[in-house]
Amino acid sequence: FLSRIEDKGLLSKVCDAKTAAKMFNPGDIIGISGFTPCGYPKITMHELAERMKETPFQVDIWTGASTGSQIDTELVAVNGIRNRMPYQTNANLRKAINAGKVNYYDLHLSHVAQQVRAGFFTNVKGEHVTGPDFAVVEVCKIGPNGELYPTTAIGNSPVYVDTAKKVIVEVNTTQPLDLVGMADIYMRKNPPFCEPIPILHAGDRVGTPYIPCDPSKIVAIVPCDMPDVTRALAPLDDDAEAMGNNLVDFLKNEVKHGRLPENLLPLQSGVGNVANAVIHGLVESDFQNLSVYTEVIQDGMVDLIDKDKIDMISGTSLSPSPDGLKRFYANIQKYNKKIVLRPQEISNNGEVVRRIGVIGMNTALEMDIYGHVNSTHVTGTKLMNGIGGSGDFARNAFLSCFFCHSTTKGGKISAVVPMCSHVDHTEHDTHVFISEQGVADVRGLTPKERAKVIINNVAHPSFRDQLMDYYERACAACGNSQTPHLLKEAFKFHESLAETGDMHFKK
Ligand code: 0RQ
């Protein structure tokens, strides 16, 4: 542990996690490292939850995205979180948010850093602040001048370290030193001093391999030997395979007609089972020399490296399954040459995404017949996970694809509905929809043209008649207006689900 602290002037700050956890005050804003259950501070947050068991109080937690159980389970269990942003995927936290016990802000992930620097957020006293009280970050090493070498995720660590009043560093001895060099930390300024980000290709390195940190802000250095605990992915099923094949056929056709180059354009893929399955389709395809500009690097991306199909992967976090993480650590010297980890402000930046022409591939909870997408709210009211980076990419992508199973919950819920119960991505941000049923390419189509393609190609056959009936009656009732709707009936699918547990209903 001590050999990982090269700035010997900082050795006096070494303390145990209990001591570090005592430094927080009620109402503090704590900005932490990590993005998905990777690279997050573990033991200090665990000790904070333990302290809260004795003396209940609350803090605000700002993260990169979802984090590990010490934060999103343990702190939630002791009612220790007042405000939480900007993304989560934890069942306990989700329950607390939907019960109104935790205030949750759902932000585009690339926007967080700029909004923190600009003072958009307030503290417990309602005062606007330009940074957290504490940054708590996991590193694998501290350099000779306080440089912080991050581990398996970058997320918002750079902005939190830069803007926090105090910094607590967890040196995680389970994280290999071979991670050093994977990070590329490019620090941005806010408008009017913002400059172009000089990334022209997915793998370009434009910053430093460490997070700069004023050593005088470091108040504690804590040893930690708890590993990242990542989430298992669902096994690939027939539907997943069908979606992957549908994507590959669609992309091959784009190449054939000269709309995409042979090695495609940099790929982005969202989080979760569907996203991982879709990448698997590419792993099995003939595409070569691919590149990836994404936020989360899941198992499928590691498979692309193993199959020698990838030139470079840019992301902000590794988020493999437990087995995928083992595979990564075992062959880290092979993988670290192909992977660049960036702050999420850069990995998801609209300017770069648009310049390099990313193929965005995100997942919908539901979509409507006109091409709007709900990624965040089950039946319009209950938060599922959050928008994450899907909006950063969908709006700016060269080609914006959305995936979903055509039905869920045993075929009772249709992914395609007349009107989305909540909209995260508008009809203007979506180009191609893919389910296990087929592909709806809605580029250049009017809303009315889109409706027919989405119903016939993406919706499940058992819901097509209901959807077409709605669409045809809406057209008749609205006199063929631009986007026909029957406002009194637009949520009948959702009402039926609430009443009978099934979106199928009798006329
Ligand atoms: O429920 O968990 O009880 O089985 O939602 O659905 O089909 O397994 O899909 O794991 O890929 O997640 C949109 C949530 C999809 C995810 C979402 C139920 C379904 C199942 C999960 P169970 P699947 P996935 C970058 C990009 C937003 C953020 C984003 C997500 C569970 O992809 O959070 O894209 N995206 N970020 O049964 C009720 C519906 C439903 C439904 C699915 N219409 N109604 N339940 N489910 N559709 C990543 C980051 O930013 C970090």
Image (cartoon, rainbow, N blue to C red):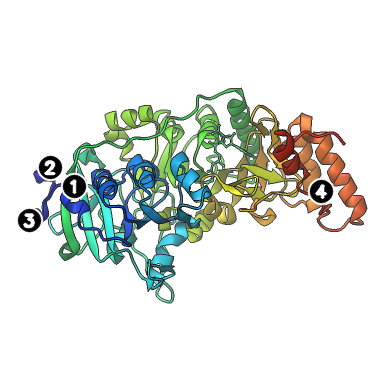
Identify which amino acid the numbered label 1 is placed on: Ala
Check disc 3 and report the residue beneath it: 12
Is 389 situated left or right of 227 in this image?
A: right
Q: CA distance from mark 3 to mark 1?
A: 15 Å
Residue 489 bears which disc, if any? Answer: 4
Check disc 2 and report the residue beneath it: 1
Image quadrant holding the C terminus, namely top right
Is 448 situated left or right of 263 in this image?
A: right
Tag in front: 3 or 4: 4
Name the secondary structure under disc 3: helix
Name the N-terminal-most of marks 3 and 1: 3
Identify which amino acid the numbered label 4 is placed on: Glu
Name the N-terminal-most of marks 4 and 1: 1
Mark 2 vs ligand 1: CB under 8 Å?
no
Q: CA distance from mark 3 to mark 4?
A: 67 Å
* Quadrant of ligand 1 in image: top right
